[in-house]
């Protein structure tokens, strides 16, 4: 067997790229977001802050907030037939109304 070379962030240049109009720094407003249980959120990774980031196969998915653990939120998503729970920092979440 050949050992896999690379990390979780391998081949992620296009997913993590920000537009020219979007500021490169992290806004304090995104740190202070509050979500309630049952809120619908979209997973959109902010490349300026790597802590609390999910695996990039879930980028662009939507899910429900199940609870909170520390500063992060537990998000329940459906990955094909399975339901999975992700622990995501609020910087990487956007509320859907």
Image (cartoon, rainbow, N blue to C red):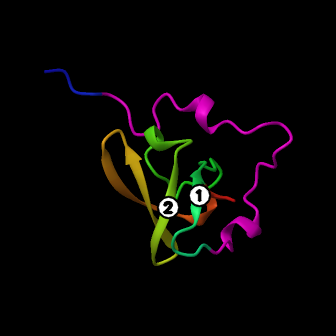
Q: Are marks 1 and 2 in contact (CB under 8 Å)?
A: yes
- Determine whether the residue tagged by mark 1 lies in a helix, strand or loop: strand
Residue range highlighted in magenta: 5-34
* Residue 28: in magenta span: yes
> In the image as oriented, which residue stretches furthest toward the right?
21
Residue 13 at x, y = what percent? 59, 30
Q: Is residue 15 left or right of residue 28?
A: left
Q: CA distance from mark 1 to mark 2?
A: 6 Å
- Foreground pick, 4 / 83: 83
> In the image as oriented, which residue stretches furthest toward the left?
1
Which residue carries the number 2 mark? Answer: 64
Kindly indicate the quadrant of the structure image that contains residue 3. Answer: top left
Q: Is residue 66 above or below residue 24?
A: below
Kindly indicate the quadrant of the structure image that contains residue 18. Answer: top right
* Residue shown at the point (83%, 37%) measured from the top left: 20
- Foreground pick, 33 / 12: 33
* Residue shown at the point (64%, 75%) measured from the top left: 34
- Foreground pick, 37 / 93: 37
Q: Identify the mark at residue 28; answer none if there is no mark.
A: none
Q: Is residue 32 left or right of residue 13?
A: right
């Amino acid at each position: 067997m050949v050992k896999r070379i690379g990390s979780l962030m391998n081949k992620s240049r296009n997913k993590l790229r920000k537009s020219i109009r979007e500021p490169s720094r992290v806004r304090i407003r995104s740190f202070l977001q509050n979500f309630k249980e049952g809120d619908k959120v979209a997973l959109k990774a902010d490349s300026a802050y790597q802590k609390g980031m999910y695996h990039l196969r879930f980028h662009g998915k939507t899910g429900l907030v199940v609870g909170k653990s520390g500063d992060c939120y537990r998000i329940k998503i459906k990955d094909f037939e399975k339901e999975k729970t992700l622990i995501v920092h609020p910087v990487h979440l956007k509320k859907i109304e």
